[in-house]
């Protein structure tokens, strides 16, 4: 409120031409900031038009013999009306409205894209780097071969450059990358993998945030492959497994498809066999049998509801379409079992959810983000 009063005084001083240089600068800086906030032109024009009409109406009430002071009083009053109107528009919650079918149809499913951050902080959009293409960034030459394997060479010496890199998939995207040892890593949406451009001696170590599927390549010297995530680490030789380590989900879950892994956490460890999953319960690691096809459904292009994992699937849908979802766990949606393809537009996905008796309403909020309300 204090800030609003100060701004009102600045506007009054400016309109009466009694402001000093510092006050004028403050007012212009404020106006520039509002311009940077990019008010939609339609709204700005409406505010401008209404203010102009109100201002002219107020001025029209003044007779020629009216004193200058009274004139400026009316001008200041109009400025206050403009100020109140602006703050009401900017900060008052906008009414939500139902998203149109056209808008929903324009929102596609996720695609393959990722950004790689090199050790020096430079970023490369990998979906713009085609197979068998090279790109020089500073002293590093980045190459993607026919299998999608990304390698690094020093531009001056031509030798393999060993550096720590980070691969990040945004919401609504996945990406497959082949590491220097031949290990294939598939990142799900909104995930991050930190890895070296080449593995030196000893264990091969990478770090994961989010979700990824690993097909670890065995080495001739039987070096281990370690994935660090949160306060856990997973060690293998050669195997296929999935790690779900999203921060907002139900803890870190490692699921084994083939081979064997050791999942450890402080003084607790479990050995997994195929079709088993490691999870944390009361601070200790546990294991249980799982349906590996369900866990890997994101890899096979499906959302898999089993009647117990509804909230997890809705979180996955939110990441895949980069939207918000409001879900009441007491709704009938929790009883649904079935599969829904991931390659649909948002409009078609909602149609299938409604067909499956998962009542869904799509609204658009003030920030123009889609929010699916599951009732």
Image: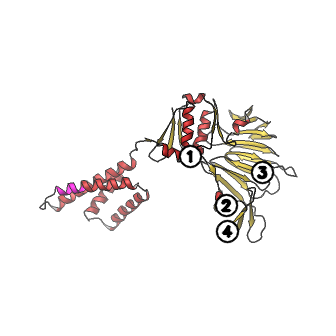
The x, y position of residue 242, in whole percent, is 72, 42
Q: In screen coordinates, is 100 left or right of 297? A: left
Mark 3 and mark 1 residues within 8 Å of each other at the beta carbon: no
Q: Which residue corresponds to mark 1?
A: 322
Q: Residue at x 44, y 46 (%)?
A: 366
Could you tell me if residue 372 is visible in this image?
Answer: yes
Q: From the viewer's side, name the closer residue of 250 and 170.
A: 170
Secondary structure at numbered mark 4: loop
**Farthest residue in the left direction?**
65
Q: Which mark is residue 191?
A: none
Whole-number angstrom distance, CA of label 3 to CA of label 1:
29 Å
Kindly report which numbered mark, 3 or 2, lies closer to the viewer in this rendering.
Answer: 2
- Where, by quadrant of the figure, is residue 16 drawn? bottom left
Q: Which residue corresponds to mark 2?
A: 129
Whole-number angstrom distance, CA of label 3 to CA of label 4:
27 Å
Could you tell me if residue 77 is visible in this image?
Answer: no
Q: Which residue corresponds to mark 3?
A: 183
Colour pattern: secondary structure
Q: Is residue 74 above or below residue 285?
A: below
Mark 4 and mark 1 residues within 8 Å of each other at the beta carbon: no
């Amino acid at each position: 409120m204090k800030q609003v009063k100060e701004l009102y005084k600045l506007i009054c001083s400016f309109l009466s031409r009694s402001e000093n240089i510092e006050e004028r600068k403050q007012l212009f800086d404020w106006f520039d900031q509002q311009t940077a906030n990019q008010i939609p032109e339609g709204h700005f024009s409406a505010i401008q038009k209404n203010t102009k009409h109100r201002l002219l109406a107020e001025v029209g009430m003044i007779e020629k013999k009216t004193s200058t002071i009274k004139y400026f009083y009316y001008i200041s009053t109009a400025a206050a009306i403009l100020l109140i109107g602006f703050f009401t528009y900017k900060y008052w919650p906008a009414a939500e409205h139902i998203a149109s079918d056209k808008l929903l149809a324009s929102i596609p499913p996720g695609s393959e894209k990722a950004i790689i951050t090199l050790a020096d902080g430079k970023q490369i959009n990998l979906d713009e780097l085609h197979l068998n293409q090279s790109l020089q960034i500073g002293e590093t030459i980045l190459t993607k071969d026919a299998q999608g394997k990304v390698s690094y060479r020093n531009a001056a010496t031509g030798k393999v450059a060993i550096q720590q890199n980070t691969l990040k998939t945004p919401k609504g995207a996945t990406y497959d990358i082949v590491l220097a040892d031949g290990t294939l890593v598939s990142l799900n949406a909104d995930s991050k993998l930190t890895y070296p451009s080449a593995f030196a001696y000893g264990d091969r170590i990478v770090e994961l945030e989010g979700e990824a599927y690993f097909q670890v390549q065995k080495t001739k010297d039987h070096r281990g492959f370690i994935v660090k995530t949160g306060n856990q680490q997973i060690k293998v030789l050669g195997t296929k497994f999935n790690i779900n380590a999203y921060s907002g989900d139900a803890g870190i879950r490692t699921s084994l498809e083939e081979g064997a892994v050791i999942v450890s956490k402080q003084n607790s460890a479990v050995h997994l066999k195929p079709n088993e999953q490691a999870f944390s319960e009361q601070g200790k690691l546990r294991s249980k049998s799982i349906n590996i096809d369900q866990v890997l459904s994101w890899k096979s292009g499906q959302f898999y509801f089993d009647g117990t994992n509804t909230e997890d699937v809705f979180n996955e849908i939110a990441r895949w379409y980069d939207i918000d979802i409001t879900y009441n766990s007491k709704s009938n949606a929790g009883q649904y079992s079935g599969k829904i393809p991931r390659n649909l537009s948002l409009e078609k996905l909602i149609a299938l959810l409604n067909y499956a008796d998962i009542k869904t309403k799509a609204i658009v909020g003030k920030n123009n983000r889609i929010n699916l309300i599951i009732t």
